[in-house]
Every structure is written in structure tokens, then in C-alpha cells.
């Protein structure tokens, strides 16, 4: 009878001990199974009333049970304490460890120079506008006085967009220069116009140290009454002085672009060698970064601006050339290959 009770008690106690997960629960368990009011202690007290033979057997067993309980209690206590210290260690913070380095982002060298260029022209009263990089053939060529069979299209190795457009016969391309923005602006707004248009342009080109298939240009356009080549020269000369320094000189020479007449190529005396000739300017002392000219009357007529009343100048410049010369970068491909070791230097 007593032996049965002991067996039952033991299995219940072990069962519950298995579910104990912290020291508080363990203490409750101890009170329940080894405390003064516990069944086990009561059984031990009861033994005195049993006949001698039963008392010996049951007493021995009860004492065994008590010893096991105590042993299991100690065991469980040790393991719970160990777990508690481990989790404390895991959660603790070593304030003497060095902090994690926060890496600061920075502006791309192209973005930096674009900001500079835009600010200079904004100060002169030009507004910054943008146009699409995926462009109709019409804006990139046709409206700029380059019909389908025009040989000048060869100057622009073109990436064509190969899909059936809704219009069917209206081919699209990746713009090869920012000049289409001129047309988009003149179509929408009557003179006076003073805008610059920064952005990406694309050429179907094998890349090497001096060629990329994508690069940036900044387009400029001014249309008003009485705009002359002198305005173009004054504006670009002032721009060169503000970007490259007061002592800069400009050289204007004849050049050809179908959408301007006359067309000019603008060079700045090399700001690296001051015009004496060095590796960067190819020993010529001059750096050519701008194509420009007076907007062709045919281009004006197409956007319904009367060339008898209005005239305008336009220019387009390559952007990467400037940081390339300024910092002596020897490979244009470094700009857009996203190597932070390169980009971090600017
Ligand atoms: N769009 C020309 C180019 O990419 C540059 C240019 C712009 C020339 C405006 C004249 C006027 O080469």
C-alpha cells in the first residue's frame, strides 16, 4: 500500500521536474515534494504506525525515494544555474569593444561636375530641363536636320530599340546626344528660351580607355530676338572661366553639325599646363569639350519658330572629359564600373 503510494509519487515528481524551466519553479517543486507538508514527509511520519516488518521495507524505500529526490533536485539546480549564466553572458554587452565603422556615401564624380555645370548656367539665367533617354528617331535625327539618308548620321553609332511600336513606322533609339531636348523644348515653349539639359547619351561603340557606350552630355539652348554668335561666345567663355579659372582662354573654330549654322568647336586652353602642351591635352595646349553653333533656320522652322524674327545658339559638351582632365584619370571605364576604391577618391 505504502509502496504503491511511493511509486506513484516518484513518477509524478519526476514528470513535473521534467517540466521545470527556471529556479523559481524548481523551488516550488522542492516545497511540493520535499517540504514539511509534502506527501513524502507525511508518509515518513506515518511509518511509525505500521507493523515492524512493513515499517522496515517501506521505511527503506521511502528513504531511498527521499535521497533520489534530493539528488535530482541538486542536479536540476546546477543545470538551471549554468543555463542562466550562459544566457547572461550571451546578452551582455562589452562596452570596451571598438564600434563598427560607419561608411559615408559620397557623390559620384560625374554628379559632382554636373552640379557644378548646372549651377554656373543657372546663375546665368538658364533653366535645367530633362528629356527621355529612349527617344524617337524623329527627335534624335530628323528634326535636327538629319533625314534618313544624311551622312552625318554616321557620326552617331546608334543603338536602335528593336520592337514593333504602336505607330509601326516610328523607330525608337537610345538618344545619341542631348540635342533632341532642344526640339522638345522649342515645340512646347515659345521664345525667349534659355535652358540646359544634362543627361545620359548612348553610342554603339566598342569600349576602351577613351570610349564608353554610355556617357553624359550637357546641352544648352538660347532662343530669342537678336541672339548672335557673340552671345554664344560670351556665354561659353564666361562658363569656361567660372569652371576652370579666371585666366582661361577660349578658342572658337569652324565645325560642322547639321543642326547649326554656322557650327563651331570650342576649345579651352589646357588648365593643366596652361597652354604650353602636356600629356593631357595631347601637346596641343587646347582641350576640346564643346560643340556649338547658331540654331539652323530649318530647325527653327520645323518647330514653328520664325527664323526671320528669332535666332538662337546651342551647344553640347561632354561631361566626363572634365573630371578626366582635372584628376588625370586614365580610363573612362572606371566611371561606371562601380569600384568603390575608385569612386571613394573624389
Ligand atoms: N550634339 C552634338 C554632339 O553630340 C553637339 C552639339 C550640340 C553641337 C549643340 C552643336 C550644337 O556631338
Image: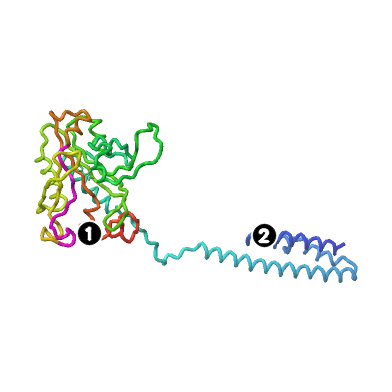
Query: Which tag, 2 or 1, sits closer to the chain's start?
Result: 2
**Residue 229 in the figure: left or right of residue 193:** left
Q: Quadrant of ligand 1?
A: top left
Asked if 20 appears above or below 265 in the picture, the reply is below
Color scheme of the displayed model: rainbow
Q: Residue at x 27, y 45 (%)?
A: 156
Q: Residue at x 32, y 48 (%)?
A: 204
Mark sitting on residue 20: 2
Q: Is mark 1 within 8 Å of ligand 1?
A: no
Range shown magenta: 278-295
- For the point 29% across and 35% down, the residue is 138
Return the x and y of residue 94 as percentages of the image width and height: 45, 65
Residue 171 vs 237, above or below: the answer is above
Q: Is residue 163 above or below residue 210?
A: above
The answer to whether residue 131 is magenta is no
The image shows residue 282 at horizontal and vertical percentages of 17, 59
Q: Which mark is residue 161?
A: none
Nearer to the camera, 331 or 297: 297
Q: CA distance from mark 2 to mark 1?
A: 70 Å
219 vs 53, nearest the viewer: 219
SS of the residue under disc 1:
helix
Dot 2 and dot 1 residues touching (CB under 8 Å) = no
- On the rendered structure, is 124 left or right of 333? left
Instruction: Say whether residue 280 is magenta.
Output: yes
Residue named by callout 1: 327
Out of 242 and 39, give the one closest to the viewer.
242
Quadrant of the frame with the N terminus: bottom right
Pick the quarter of the image with the C terminus: bottom left
Amino acid at each position: 500500500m505504502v509502496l504503491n503510494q511511493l511509486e506513484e509519487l516518484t513518477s509524478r515528481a519526476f514528470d513535473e521536474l521534467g517540466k521545470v524551466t527556471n529556479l523559481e519553479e524548481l523551488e516550488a517543486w522542492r516545497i511540493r515534494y520535499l517540504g514539511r507538508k509534502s506527501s513524502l514527509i507525511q508518509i515518513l511520519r506515518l511509518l511509525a504506525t505500521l507493523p515492524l516488518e512493513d515499517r522496515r521495507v517501506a521505511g527503506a524505500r521511502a528513504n531511498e525515494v527521499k535521497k533520489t529526490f534530493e539528488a535530482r533536485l541538486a542536479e536540476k539546480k546546477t543545470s538551471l544555474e549554468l543555463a542562466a549564466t550562459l544566457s547572461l553572458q550571451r546578452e551582455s554587452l562589452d562596452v570596451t569593444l571598438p564600434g563598427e565603422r560607419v561608411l559615408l556615401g559620397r557623390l559620384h564624380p560625374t554628379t559632382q561636375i554636373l552640379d557644378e555645370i548646372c549651377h554656373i548656367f543657372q546663375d546665368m539665367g538658364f533653366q535645367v530641363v530633362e528629356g527621355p533617354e529612349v527617344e524617337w528617331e524623329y527627335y534624335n535625327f530628323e528634326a535636327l536636320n538629319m533625314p534618313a539618308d544624311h551622312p552625318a548620321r554616321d557620326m552617331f553609332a546608334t543603338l536602335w530599340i528593336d520592337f514593333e511600336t504602336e505607330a509601326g513606322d516610328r523607330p525608337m533609339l537610345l538618344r545619341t546626344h542631348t540635342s533632341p531636348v532642344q526640339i522638345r523644348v522649342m515645340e512646347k515653349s515659345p521664345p525667349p528660351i534659355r535652358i540646359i539639359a544634362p543627361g545620359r547619351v548612348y553610342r554603339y561603340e566598342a569600349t576602351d580607355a577613351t570610349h564608353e557606350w554610355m556617357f553624359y552630355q550637357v546641352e544648352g539652348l538660347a532662343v530669342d530676338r537678336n541672339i548672335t554668335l557673340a552671345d554664344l561666345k560670351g556665354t561659353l567663355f564666361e562658363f569656361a572661366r567660372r569652371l576652370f579659372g579666371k585666366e582661361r582662354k577660349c578658342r572658337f573654330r569652324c565645325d560642322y553639325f547639321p543642326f547649326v549654322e554656322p557650327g563651331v568647336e570650342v576649345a579651352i586652353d589646357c588648365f593643366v599646363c596652361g597652354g604650353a602642351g602636356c600629356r593631357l591635352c595631347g601637346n596641343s595646349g587646347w582641350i576640346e569639350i564643346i560643340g556649338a553653333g547658331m540654331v539652323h533656320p530649318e530647325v527653327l522652322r520645323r518647330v514653328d519658330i520664325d527664323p526671320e524674327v528669332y535666332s538662337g545658339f546651342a551647344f553640347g559638351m561632354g561631361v566626363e572629359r572634365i573630371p578626366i582632365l582635372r584628376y588625370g584619370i586614365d580610363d573612362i571605364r572606371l566611371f561606371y564600373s562601380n569600384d568603390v576604391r575608385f569612386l571613394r577618391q573624389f
